[in-house]
Image (cartoon, helix red, strand yellow):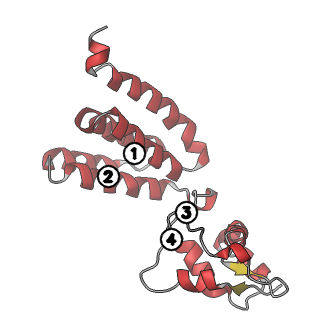
Amino acid sequence: MLLQKTEKARLELLPGVRTLSLRERSLLLLADGKPLSDLQAMYNGIGAQIVENLMRQGYLTGPAQPPAADAAPPRDKPSIQRPEPGESLRSLAGARMYLFDTCERLFARRDPVLAQHFREALRAAKDRDSMLDAGEALFEEVALTAGAERAASLREKFELLLPLASVPRTAAASTATTGAADATQPAALAR
């Protein structure tokens, strides 16, 4: 079956519009008139999941199907929606880059020495466990400086980027860290 881009896909590919991941956009660029089997084989077989998501979201259609009537985003929701990361978008490298970005945004200007410490720890983290440990240290510092809620929010986004096999370890750590951070809150100290 040959796939075709919908109008929603053409709008997504306009300059300045970025609601899809890099892999989704690149697959969308190649999609017009390509056989479904070719696109599904892309990205070491993960292309099948990406194609399925793009078809479900109304970016791609087969020649026998008319473009989906609900291809335009609903008016009551924001026009830019980020899809939940699927397995194809989860990686330790992406999670590590998120930690670097978080470090830069939160500590580079406020505490350059601490930011440098976290940068070095993240650069030295060559395996999964050491990277997760450096991330936990970063989130603990965020809890101390910006509060437990902010740290929990950042940790939740971080966990969405981790491969599924890595999530349980950090979920347990987040519970422990949140409990430790709650102990420093005024309500907890009054007990």
Image-quadrant location for residue 184: top left
Q: Secondary structure at mark 2?
A: helix
The answer to whether residue 147 of the structure is visible from this angle is yes
Question: In the displayed image of the protein, which residue is found farthest to the bottom?
Answer: 33
The tag earlier along the polypeptide, 1 or 3, is 3
Which residue position is annotated with label 3? 76
The amino acid beneath tag 1 is: Leu
The amino acid beneath tag 4 is: Thr
* Neighbourhood count class around disc 3 (C-alpha, 10 Å): few under 14, some 14–19, many 20 upward: few
The tag earlier along the polypeptide, 1 or 4, is 4
Cα–Cα span, label 3 and label 4: 17 Å
Where is residue 104 drawn, in percent x and y?
A: 25, 55
Where is residue 138 drawn, in percent x and y?
A: 31, 41
2 or 1: mark nearer the eye = 1
Which residue position is annotated with label 2? 102
Residue contact between numbered discs 2 and 1, judged by CB atoms under 8 Å: yes
1 or 4: mark nearer the eye = 4
Residue contact between numbered discs 3 and 4, judged by CB atoms under 8 Å: no
Closer to us: 172 or 145: 145
The amino acid beneath tag 2 is: Thr
Which residue position is annotated with label 1? 154
